[in-house]
Amino acid sequence: MGDEPHMDGGILDSIVFMEQSLAQRVQAFGTEDQETVRQWKKLNTEYNISAMKFLQEDGYDTALDLLGRAKQLTTSGVKFGEVDDRRKLLAITYNNMSCVYKRRGLLKTALGYAEKALKLETQSTKADNPACTHLNLCAILSRLARHRHALEHCQCALQLLKAGNFCGANTPGLMNDFHDGVEPESSILAVCYHNMAVEHEHLGEDDKALQAYYRSVEVAGLELGPDHPITQAFAERADEAQANLEKKQKEKERGKHAKKGGGGGRGQP
């Protein structure tokens, strides 16, 4: 970890204090005590949030160490909370592990953790991140050139978002890396439409791509305002998609005319 960027040592010192406090609480009151469970959830959340802070500074080793501790806290023989609580927290940890490996370019490993997260979320009644997990899978699969599968996950995310399922605050890493060049602040629905547009483009479905791009602009404008940088960036991409589609249509028309002209001249000197 010596080559990693300097971070405030207070973060790790605070985590050590929380670890010691939880250990003392367990020894005194057991794992089923309500305050013990509260501290367990708080420590797990702190592991994940701190890991993502280190990731933003390229502190990969420290991030993975913290996420490893979070995983241990939910999978060890010492059981805290209800089963659904453990599944929910473990899914968050797996999602963030996926973000770390995705950032490092280890896409197949990232995909494996994201798929594990989604499986856990489908088994938990308390999971609040399925839409974000689908978007994470979309971003990974897109980079693996598996665009049809990526689009399917984006469509699943859209259905969940329309039903009112939004990303939980404990998954900060996901919000920064849904697709290359996109750094959403709050308009996750707009990002979802944007990603759908990107995947439609990859699949040669230009009309559908253009519709999705304009929906991303519309939603971002409503949620962030028309002058927000994200709204403006999405609008530029929509205009580019419109221009590209018109260019393709003109080339197609020219091709038809050229073909007709060639046919009429057949047999002439």
Image (cartoon, rainbow, N blue to C red):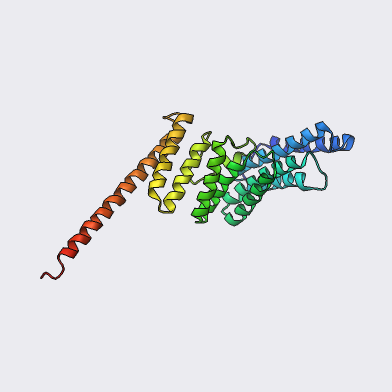
Q: Which of these two is toward me, 48 or 167?
A: 167
Q: Is residue 152 left or right of residue 50?
A: left
- Residue 239, given in percent of the width and then of the height, sits at 35, 41
- Residue 62, given in percent of the width and then of the height, sits at 67, 46
Residue 265 occupies quadrant: bottom left
Q: Residue furthest left?
A: 269
- Residue 59, given in percent of the width and then of the height, sits at 63, 45
Q: Is residue 219 left or right of residue 104?
A: left
Whether residue 224 is situated above or below residue 12 in the rendered picture: above
Q: Which of these two is toward me, 151 or 71?
A: 151
Please tell me which residue is depicted at 51% across the width and 52% down the height of the picture: 142
Please tell me which residue is depicted at 38% across the width and 39% down the height of the picture: 236
Residue 246, can we see it?
yes
Residue 56, can we see it?
no
Residue 91 occupies quadrant: top right
Please tell me which residue is depicted at 49% across the width and 54% down the height of the picture: 148
Q: Which of these two is toward me, 28 or 21?
A: 28
Residue 29 occupies quadrant: top right
Count of residue discs: 0
- Residue 253, given in percent of the width and then of the height, sits at 25, 53
Quadrant of the image containing the C terminus: bottom left
